Amino acid sequence: MRHDVYAPDLAPSRAAVHAASGNRLGASHPRQEGPTDLRLVPPALAAWATAALMLDAPTVWVGGAVVVCLVAAGVLLLVRRGGLGDGRAAGPRVGPMSGVGSVPGRDSAPGRGAVAGRDAVPGREAVPRREAVPGRNSVPGRCTRPRRQGSASLRLTWPRTAVAWPRISVAAVLLCVAAAAVSAGLHGADLRRGPVPGLAREYATVTAEVEVTSDPRLTRPRVQGDHMAPTSVLINADVRRVEEAHGTAVVTRAPVLMIVDATARSSGAGDADGASTSSGSGGADGVPRPPGAGDVDGAPRPPGSERSDGTPGPPGSGDPDGAPRPPGSGDASEAWQPADDRRSPWLGLLPSTRLRVAATLAPALTDGDRIAAVLRVRDPGAPEVVGEPSGAQRLAGRLRAGLREATDGLPADARALLPGLVVGDTSRITPELDEAFKETDLAHTLAVSGSNLTIILALLIGPPGLAQRVERRGLAPRLGISLRTTALLGGALTLAFVVVCRPDPSVLRAAACGAVALLALATGRRRSLIPALATAVLLLVLYDPWLARSYGFLLSVLATGALLTLAPRWSKALRRRRVPPRLAEALAAAAAAQALCAPVVAVLSARVSLVAVPCNLLAEFAIAPATVLGFAALAAAPAAMPLAKLLAWGASWPTGWIADVARTGAALPGAGVDWPGSWTGAALLALATVVVLLIGRRLLRHPWWCGVCGALLLLVVLQPPPLTRVVTGWPLPGWRFAMCDVGQGDATVLAAGEGTGVVVDAGPDPALVDRCLRTLGITRVPLVVLTHYHADHVAGLPGVLRGRAVGAIETTGHEEPVDQVEFVRREAAARRIPVMRAAAGEERRTGALSWQVVWPPAQPALAPDGPNDASVTLLVRSAGLRLLLLGDLEPPAQRALLRSPAGALLGGVDVLKVAHHGSAYQDPELIRRAAPRLALISCGADNPYGHPAPSTVAALRAQGAVVLRTDEDGALAVAGTGAELRVAGD
């Protein structure tokens, strides 16, 4: 028997894997891992790019690409199989370990006889590789097989793998490209085949049988000029049978977007930042009109929602996770959704339901969408159901409805967030809350993600690293469930997760990524997740090529990749600098995900969040308990509603914390910075991120510099008003009047003391007016004056009320439009703010500020010709300044004002807030009577109304007024008295 000889000078004193553990006794479960296997990454990326390109490519191109790829792959594989070019011509070489296959890059290196750093020791002869090392390669009590003499010194090998592997890899890439092209071609053909596309180009009226494929959702309200666009129900569906007007019926399968007018009109303004917009020509609903057609009533795809395929829309789009967000309902902050007793019956439809509808077909507004046409339903009444939903969808619908019922008694934020955290049901998320989550990059928590599934499966199997060991924890071993049965239960949970959360592409992607992440963690090998993630991407893209164009899918893959590649290294670096392990892991995960996802988020929102990492850290520890308790409430609701309500109440605490984190972070003055919303901007942000990381790596060695940089970042985010005033000059010291830049609308502020201001009108966008008031340092508002109820003056009211002490709201007596009137009342009632009516002759004072209402009269002789002529008009005196605020008065009301008793008081004002955004409809006599020194106009850049009118600007300048406008000069602040009148912009 031959005994192996151990060379002490060639072996380390401790195994490297134990030494790296930091423990004197080494790691309890040591693992030695080789380099990351990236062989599946090129095929996955190639399939992804191919699917994105081939979805709308002509059939000839798709077929040609498939044939070329198959032929090239076949040639490569046949050449390999025939043994040609396998490297035998290179001849033999000498190397250790006779009879053992070479490893690419190590044993196959030309002219190399020993492994560098192990078999070859500098200054010594090359020692043949030992056959066994006591305590490592040899097993006590077992004889090792002796080698023949000289077997360790000579080996004849050929570098076969060094040549073969590239060919196999290229062939695999080509085969994946061919498969992706076939799948994308077939899915893209669904949009072009059948009669639906042709009928859509003719704007034909048809009777169709459709199958619902998504949950119905309401469009967000949007301000169109001075009114709110009507609300519509959006439903994704497949047309299965279509009948033309002459009676011809055709069986087909074409994806469409159904648009149905909501029977109950929007009852409030909501947040304009969630407002719908459309590009190009089309009706109010974003559906293209045929030439010469009139206005088509409805609502377009809103920014912040996605395309019909689950892909986020253009810049300003919201959920990166791929889920369109319907508006919320329930309390005053959600007043823009119809109440339950007025809800459209279409909102109760479940996926897989079959309907028969009479509708008008229209082409999709933009190319590249997942729909063949838009189906405009003519009758908004109850839908005609011809096929009930499947049993699985009915069960999922009952579970989701049960969770909503269990959350009914919770505070508003918890009631809105909990269904979204658990099953992705965002039907109660308000635009205001949604905007806060976007500002802090917490939007991923509002939609289904892989972390939801991971949390639930981790509850079943315990700590993932122990899942395959005797010490495994979780519910399964406590209940005596075997490992194989546990795996089956995990699969069943995953399937139930997909059914309850709807098998939409975004949900399938979340389930796949979550399952892959848990699988990799359960094996304890982080590096194995890269090929597993590549496999998941490849399979999902082949299954649904539309995912290749989904921003949500891209963000998910980037975030998962960051957690697997960057986060472990950054966590280890932080631990080396004495950061606690758990904090290091959380900080590294949040920073890595933000670094990789930020460029894509910037493309969608044209903004970069500076508070994303700390907000995600603060919210992270609350997500798991909220999710677990939420799923428990979901499961308990059908059988025991009181128990479900109790569990939902427990989940409301962490859920409320998450909402508070989002609102607080979004309210910070420097929460984010504007950034170019293009791929060029994304590239610049990626470059800036790399530079910051390189600088930060060096700064970590200098704690003092780290503290200085942290303090500077804190100042940028907090922006203390005194410091901001010194740096930017805004707001103007001693300002008396400010006009906020809120786009096409009005929002002005009268200074009434330190941190106090009277707000006149709120503009169309809550976010913009809130930001303006924050920069002005306004925290107390004794009075909000809403000159009239048009949406461009009242829709931003939630932004004025957000986080401020408001004393009262004063409005005009002409209560039209009704929906805006109801919205204002609901917002006021939710915060217990009294609403009063203004009338001519009323005088008020607070500190050095006083004002008089000069219009409208308490008892008008004639009914006003619309809300504009009933605008509340104020004559203001502030520290020697005289200001006239005209609202949106039209010439008839302006002439009546001049004839009124207050007309004699209007002469020689210092500042004039020009009526109706500077429109051409102005009374020349009023301009001459007022003779303002400074005329301010609030209007939006490139507005479709041509405001301000050149004739109005010329008339003001002819009277000696300096004319400034927010579309060119931004927000404006006025200070000084008499001859020392000063004005500055932000």
Image: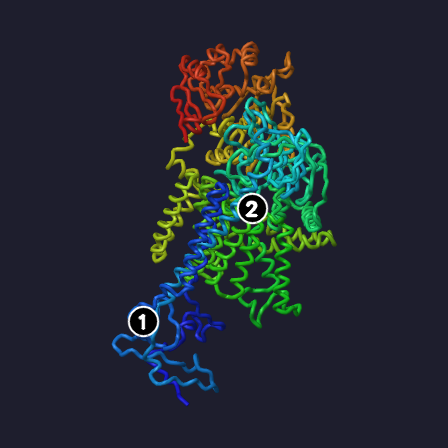
In the displayed structure image, the side of residue 380 where residue 139 appears, left or right: left
Which numbered disc covers residue 660? 2
Q: For the C terminus, which image quadrant?
A: top left
Assess disc 1: are there few (<14), some (14-19) or many (≥20) residues with their C-alpha within 10 Å of its C-alpha.
Answer: few
397 to the left or right of 55: right
Q: Position of residue 633 (x, y in %)?
A: 67, 53
Residue at screen point 54% across, 13% down: 891
Gap between marks 2 and 1 measured at Cα: 57 Å
Quarter of the rendering occupied by the N terminus: bottom left
Q: Position of residue 457 (x, y in %)?
A: 60, 60
Task: Compare marks 2 and 1 and give the one earlier in the sequence.
Answer: 1
Nearer the observer, 182 or 237: 182
Tell me the number on the disc at residue 794. Answer: none
Q: Does residue 376 sit above or below 350 in this rendering?
A: above
* Circle 2 Cα neighbour tier, 10 Å, few/some/many (<14 / 14–19 / ≥20): some
Eye-nearest disc, 2 or 1: 1
The quadrant in which residue 911 appears is top left
- Three-letter amino acid code of the residue under disc 2: Asp
Q: Mark 1 sits on what residue?
A: 116
Q: Tell me residue 672's x, y (percent).
A: 45, 42
Q: Position of residue 878 (x, y in %)?
A: 48, 23
Q: Nearer the viewer, residue 150 or 560?
A: 150
User: Please, what secondary structure does the residue beneath circle 2 have?
Assistant: helix
- As displayed, is residue 452 above or below residue 837? below
